[in-house]
Image (cartoon, helix red, strand yellow):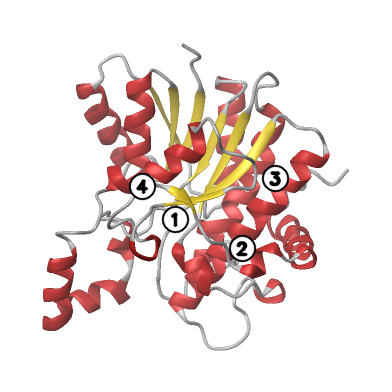
Amino acid sequence: MDKKCIVITGANSGIGYAATQHFARKGDRIIMACRSMDKADKARQEILAEVPAADLTVLRLDVSDLESVQAFARQFIEQFGELDILINNAGIVAIPLQRNSAGHEMQMATNYLGAFALTGLLLPHFRKQGECRIVNVCSLAHRMGKLLVDDLNWDQGEYDQWQSYGRSKVAMMSHTLELNKRLQAQGSNVIALGAHPGFANTNIHSNSPALSKEKTNPVSKWFHAQMQKIIPSATQAAQPIILAAEGADVKGGDYYGPGGLLETGICGKPGKARINKAAFDPALAKQLWEKSEQLSGVGFLNA
């Protein structure tokens, strides 16, 4: 069996945890890149209880903090040297306006910019033999997002937490396609793909006051309770991400999501998903890449 070295951000909960479980059962080496070491250690122990021989290492990574991204990359390279698969999974959704220490809007920083920087820092360290993969976790919401390259930090206009989420995810989708295009142009053995979980019964919404407020409304509370009966589990929702990471027939630039009603995953099997047309715009993708390099301080694939 070919043992893979896999980095998964946000591996301690939700679909990240489910993906970690899957690869642990297969015997792969997983680096659990997580913001909370306590939560990550707990998740690691839970998986080890099920899979005693699991090869799991916890390293601290706060993807919203570019200094943390740099520190993680240095530690990973020093400790492991090379990897086969990077799954950029960590994310937040619909939070009030916040900025990180560099002044970047928090959803864009967490859901996209940190992943951009991490990818650039780890790219030279992918294994040179065989096919390696970068899987960027996107969202159904990317189809509602606008790619406003001149205002990635939401310095203009009135902030909207849901629009911000959509913007961060369409940025991730555009980057994924451009990344794969640039990798192909250089003859790399690394491919880039996108995937989304559809609706999932995870705790990613726990930090969203908007959703928490909705759940206290009597009608919304009842509706939410009914939806919990049919919304896919984290394990089910992780299947498109797992497919992108290890599927035999996938290709660079593919985008996978759950099947069923409007790609929610309520029924059906994972397959190709629809992409926001804005993500295909080559001029916007080039501008986004340049802006991302400027904001993150990480440049790559420009030759």
Q: Amino acid at mark 2?
A: Ala
The type of residue carrying mark 3 is Asn
| Sequence-earlier tag: 4 or 3 | 3
What separation in Å lies between label 2 and label 4 (alpha carbons)?
A: 26 Å
Residue lying furthest top: 1
Residue 217 visible in the shown view: no
Residue mark closest to the camera, 2 vs 4: 4
Q: Which mark sits nearer the N-terminus, 1 or 2? A: 1
Question: Looking at the image, is 153 positioned above or below residue 7?
Answer: below
Quarter residue 288 falls in: bottom right
Q: Given the image, on which type of amino acid does mark 1 rest?
A: Gly
Q: Which residue is mark 4?
A: 269
Image height check: is 275 above or below 60?
Answer: below
Judging from the image, what secondary structure is the residue with disc 1 in?
loop
- Contact check, label 1 and label 2, Cβ < 8 Å: no
130 or 290, nearer to the observer: 130
The CA distance from mark 1 to mark 3 is: 21 Å
Residue occupied by mark 1: 91
Q: Secondary structure at mark 2?
A: helix
Q: Residue at x 42, y 45 (%)?
A: 240
Secondary structure beneath dot 4 equals: loop
Tell me the distance, in whole angstroms, between the alpha carbons under discs 1 and 2. Answer: 13 Å
Residue where numbered disc 3 is placed: 180
Q: Residue 104 vs residue 185: left or right?
A: left
Q: Nearer the viewer, mark 4 or mark 1?
A: 4
Badge 2 density bin: few <14, some 14–19, many ≥20, Cα 10 Å: many
The span from disc 4 to disc 1 (Cα, nearest Å) is: 24 Å
Q: Residue at label 2?
A: 171
